[in-house]
Amino acid sequence: MRGVSAPGGTRTSTVAQVLEEHLRRSGLPPDAGASEPFAVVKVGPLPYPIPNTRSRRRAVRIHDLNHLVSGYRTDREGELEISAWELASGGCGHYGAAWVLDLAGLFAGLFVCRTRTVAAFGRGRSQRNLYPHAPDDLLAMDIDEARALTDVAPLGRLARLPASVHLAVLSLAAVPVFVAMSVAWWFLYPAWLLKDIVIQESSRFPPEMSTVWNQYLAMDAWNPPRLHQRASMRSQFSAGSACSNTAPAARKLRSRCCG
């Protein structure tokens, strides 16, 4: 792997290069799943699909880099640890999705792997995460320079509290977030399952239906201003000659999506 020159003639890898290798070893796609409608995490035996909104896609760019500089893995326990570490090391700045997911991760971590979660929180109290920095600037750095950015204590009022009080405040804040996400699972899980069924069924569409249906799927279902436009697409999909002479698989899918 090529890198940049460091003092003494040695060569270190850039953050972008290390990230590419990290994603490959973790079995993740090169875009870290940014093009997928959902990001799926394992919660016990069940998958938890998280809508891959614009806010989450922005946050995950820094979150992945925090994995690199902190050393926490991308398995279940590692994600719970880094949630605690990010909250303790300065919080998530203006990345709203990161706040929500980290608070839920902290709460879960206190039950799933309490000792490791508390240790990660304690470590984060003496470091600063990468959320204050621009992603593109970070990717251009060498990895040692990026790690050096964490070697300073975090700022803010919470950082000045005793560690036990700091953890207690964030744990209390995490309770409503965790409850809301638990309730949301009952809606997100069927939506995620339907997404897979839709993709499977749409692969068997006759050519004349593909354009309309693919445009419908490409719209952001989580963006309210698009609802009227999606309704118009549904009408186009459910009416006319393209739908009147469809294959059985297409008629089956039309009945699910068009009512």
Image: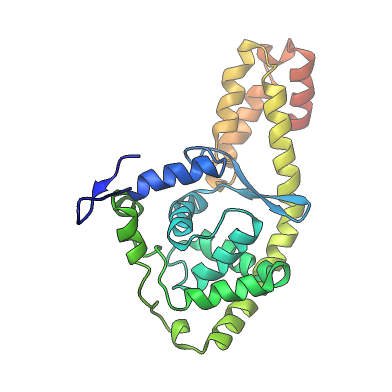
Q: Tell me the quarter of the image containing the C terminus.
A: top right
Relative vertical location of residue 126 with respect to residue 74 in this rendering, above or below: below
At horizontal 58% and vertical 87% (from top left) the residue drawn is 164
Relative vertical location of residue 154 with respect to residue 140 in this rendering, above or below: below
Q: Is residue 32 visible?
A: no
Rendering coords of residue 76 (x, y %): 65, 57
Relative vertical location of residue 11 with respect to residue 146 in this rendering, above or below: above
**Depth check: 43 or 93 in front?**
43
Q: How many marks?
A: 0
Relative vertical location of residue 48 with respect to residue 119 in this rendering, above or below: above
**Depth check: 161 or 184 in front?**
161
Rendering coords of residue 248 (x, y %): 79, 15
Rendering coords of residue 116 (x, y %): 63, 70
At horizontal 58% and vertical 39% (from top left) the residue drawn is 228
At horizontal 20% and vertical 55% (from top left) the residue drawn is 8
**Depth check: 223 or 105 in front?**
105
The image quadrant that residue 176 belongs to is bottom right
User: Is residue 123 toward the left or the right of residue 132 in the image?
Assistant: right
Rendering coords of residue 49 (x, y %): 67, 48
